[in-house]
Image: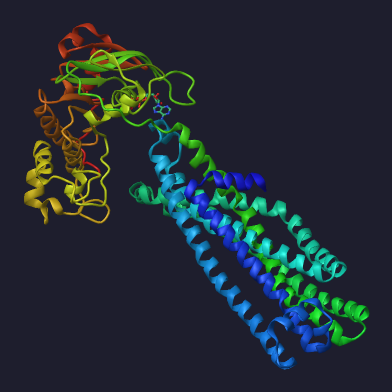
Amino acid sequence: MLTVLKETLSLFDRAEKLELALVFVIVLTVATLEVVGIASILPFLTVVSNPEMIHEQYVLRYLWGLLEPSDHNSFLFTLGLIVFGLIILTNLFNAVSHWLIQRFIWLRHHSLSTRLLDRYIRQRWEFFLNRNTSELSTNILSEVQQFVGQFLMAGIQLLAQGLAGVLIVGLLVAIDPTLAVIVSAVVGGTYMLIFVAVRATQIKLGHIRTSSNTARYRHATEAMSGMKDLKILGLEEAFLRKYEGPSYRYSMAQAKNAVIAITPRYFLEVLGFGAVMLILLYELRQQGTASNAIPVVGVYAFAGFRLLPKMQQMFYSGSSMRFTAETLSGLKRDLVELQRSEEPAPVHVSAPIESFGLRNVTFNYPEMGEPTLKNVNIEIATLSSVALVGPTGSGKTTTVDLLLGLLEPTSGGLVLDGNLLSASERIGWRSHCGYVPQQIYLTDDTIAGNIAFGESADEWSMERIKKAAQIAQIDEFIEQELPEGYLTVVGERGVRLSGGQRQRLGIARALYNDPEILVFDEATSALDNTTERAIMDAIEQLAGTKTLVVIAHRLETVRKCDIIFVFEKGELIDSGCWDELLSNCDVFRSMVSEDSMGKGRKPNQTATP
Ligand SMILES: Nc1ncnc2c1ncn2[C@@H]1O[C@H](COP(=O)(O)OP(=O)(O)OP(=O)(O)O)[C@@H](O)[C@H]1O
Ligand SMILES: [Mg+2]
């Protein structure tokens, strides 16, 4: 119980903890008011059933002296008004506390999900290689909601009902200890028994809920993002079945848990009626006459009317918490523990004057035994154009990711004009690099918005957008063929672009911030030969104004590069210009001859969007 509280508090900042404390105070006030309201019934009922008691009972005698009523009836009327006032006040506070609790809960939904997204996007690149991204979205969009809407809400309710329950039982003990102990033992004991009995089942259901929720999100996301493959391979049925399983399990777990949570209610009515009968008999025996027994029985009836639903709600809250307990550990893992593995804040570094590169770099992907790169040394002169070539899996992309400062070398480091960069400088370094991947990711935005990626319409510079488009040689297409020019919407809901157009848009995006270094990782590999040639021409236009780093499958495309680095099995085995390599490097020679025999060449294909 205490660890649950501690773990929950660890998710909140100072202001949120203070707000939670305020919620606690309000909840306590409501509980106290409620008990005072119930207690005030006793003198009222005593006067109704037995007017002589006014002068015998201390509290009544005191009130009589205070109010100085003209007769019994007006005394009764005043007492009634006081009880009435208390009930109004209680309900007023109840409404306020309801608002405060709901506000607290839903603002935590906002703050926790925002913080979670913040945690994720600040992780190192390696993190995203290991985690399923749809699982991350599930956590942000669904698990946070389950946590606040069910777990946290249930926790606060449990607290509220628990406090009120304890105070009410306290009141009953004050009126008649023996009776109170017997009644609470019977009613409370029944609840505890059921609560303990369903424990294992609920924990199991909670586990099914978590895992099936992640799975159904994953299958839905995968179906949507792989729609083209899905259609061509005719996998509609297969994907549907994949989704159906976890979706069914998720729904069944919710349904079963909902039933468990209200089971005791069926016992409750039986129990409640039995209890009132018992109390009546007991009081009749104790007090002798019905009129003496009525006040106590009345208070019990009223207390029961308030207490029994509370016990039911406590049970409900307790079982909700149990069912969604895994959301707490999941959130704690990702919100609190991931904080330690965030990237450091970037530190600005100036652009290289002479060269940059990798020094003695060895790199291991997490959880991989063998290092992927072994002792790689690369020096790239500024404004030169270089190529990375080698068989598939030889480590070219890994090298580029290290050059971009995305990956952190296991040993060795990124060097700028001979100086080794620190981790923070490595992140600052990225602002000098532009990157064009094999597949451009287009957002559901205008052409302009896709070029000025991440900037909104009032931030971007149309002049720079047009200049980038012009260098990438897509300006004519945009201006002449698209209905609304740079403001034409592309992506999900907008016009479809061909592979070559997408790639050019990607180049324009990389150029928009005018970086000193441009990296192309197989940026033209998905294109047919003619389009590839056109795009390579556009890239070659940049030679001499930017430092270019190109990875290309087809060697012919990098013939004009100043230096070609040859990779094999994670090692840099040779480097030099085309002709040097052709005469000195066996591996390169055989790659070139394979390439010209057409093995590395693809047939003219229509580029896929
Ligand atoms: N996220 C990863 N986790 C573990 N191993 C990886 C990961 N990414 C790549 N590797 C491994 O590292 C090696 C080098 O991969 P890399 O992507 O750098 O090769 P590449 O030369 O770019 O190949 P290709 O020409 O096919 O793109 C491969 O053996 C690959 O299996
Ligand atoms: Mg690669």
Q: Is residue 119 above or below residue 378?
A: below
Judge by depth and name the residue closer to the eye, 417 or 222: 417
Q: Position of residue 395 (x, y in %)?
A: 34, 22
Judge by depth and name the residue closer to the eye, 411 or 306: 306
Visible residue check, residue 24? yes
Q: Is residue 2 left or right of residue 244?
A: right
Picture quadrant where residue 543 is located:
top left
Residue at the image point whose x is 26% and y is 35% from the top: 438
Q: Is residue 232 above or below residue 530?
A: below
Here the colouring is rainbow
Visible residue check, residue 247? no
Residue at the image point whose x is 83% and y is 88% from the top: 52
Q: Position of residue 603 (x, y in %)?
A: 21, 34
Residue at the image point whose x is 59% and y is 78% from the top: 88
Q: Is residue 6 above or below residue 318?
A: above
Quarter of the displayed picture in which ligand 2 can be seen = top left
